[in-house]
Image: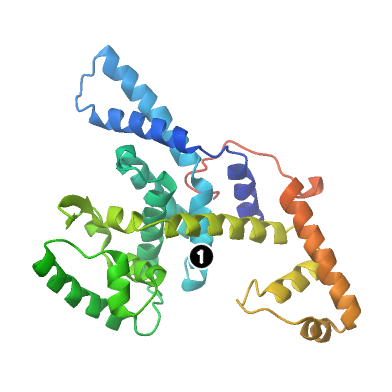
Amino acid sequence: MSDTLRDYLNQIGKIPLLTAAEEIELGHAIQKMIAVQTDQPSKEEQRILRIGRRAKDRMIKGNLRLVVGVAKKYRHMTNRLTMHDLVQEGNIGLIRAVELFDPARGYKFSTYAYWWIRQGIMRSIQVQDRMIKLPTGAMDALRKVRTFTLEYQSEYGRTPSIAECAEVANITVRAMKDYLAASIDAGSLDASVNQSGESSTYIELIACEGPTVDDEVEQDTKIEAVTQALEYMSPDHRQALTMRYGLDTGGETTVVQIAKTLKIGRDAASKMIRASENEMRLILKKGPPKKHSRQNNSSSLIWGWG
């Protein structure tokens, strides 16, 4: 992790997160601001505009960590784009989500924003890096779903749910969401679809498909915290923990294998793993050692750190 990225993470880590009630309050203020359509606002409208601008700024800054978490998930998909690039694109998606979020819909802002952020990042990879990597069979699954969707709409008069599409394609709901997010053109996200007689947009339909997205957001936050904590650990402890839990490969390594790799005894490897786990818990609980702390500055957080 570069020093500039670490500085940026330290800065946004100091910004308080928003509660669900605050998201709703800020969302209403933003929508009121957007509703003011005049070049010569009255005093009351000027007040609404001021409150709305502050609310928009607060909503954006309160969700910058979410952007970084999503960007990290897709960093491995790129050849040329940097984390800085992905965060910039994700922040554009975040701003779009802030402007369009309707609290009356009933879902959490993070759930809604997640898909806009993800879409912005994935589209940038497609257009700028041209290295988007959908799993083998993804296009076949999408073709099958498109055919099913047309037939379903014709018979039932509504768009099938993500779960119904996933069942037809014989894939998980999460995989179905990934495929859709990668395949839907960014300009089509606001296109209306008819779901159970009620007009929605693609992005709202994806975001409202149950609690799994919230689970993903929570998991991303945990992964982000662990990833940051690893950077503050001693090299030996970082390597031991990374190998033991497969943090870079997805596959766990046995104590015996770790001992062989590090050229130490099995007991020594076990002790190192326990010490690594304790060090990780301490960092997650109390934060990084003071010697690593950096000064915050007033540079633009929304547009990255460069």
Point out the image quarter for the N terminus.
Answer: bottom right
Q: Is residue 84 visible?
A: no
Residue name at image x 20 percent, y 24 percent = 39
Say what amino acid the circle numbered 1 marks. Answer: Lys
Other residues around mark 1 within 10 Å, as few (<14) / some (14–19) / many (≥20): few
Q: Is residue 143 above or below residue 174?
A: below
- Camera sees residue 118: yes
Q: Measured from the top left, where is residue 28 in percent x and y?
A: 34, 31
Q: Which residue is rendered at x = 77% and y = 73% of the image?
A: 240
Q: Nearer the viewer, residue 3 or 74?
A: 74
Does 116 appear above or below 161? above
User: Residue 41's x, y, as percent?
Assistant: 23, 19
Image quadrant where residue 116 sits: bottom left
User: 236 and 255: which one is in front?
Assistant: 255
**Residue 21 percent coordinates (x, y):** 45, 33
Q: Is 251 displayed left or right of 65 in the figure?
A: right
* Vertical arrangement, residue 146 with respect to residue 43, above or below: below
User: Between residues 261 and 81, which one lies in front from this camera angle?
Assistant: 261
**Relative to 49, residue 213 above or below:** below
Q: To which residue does mark 1 refer?
A: 73
Say left or right for 305 vs 41. right
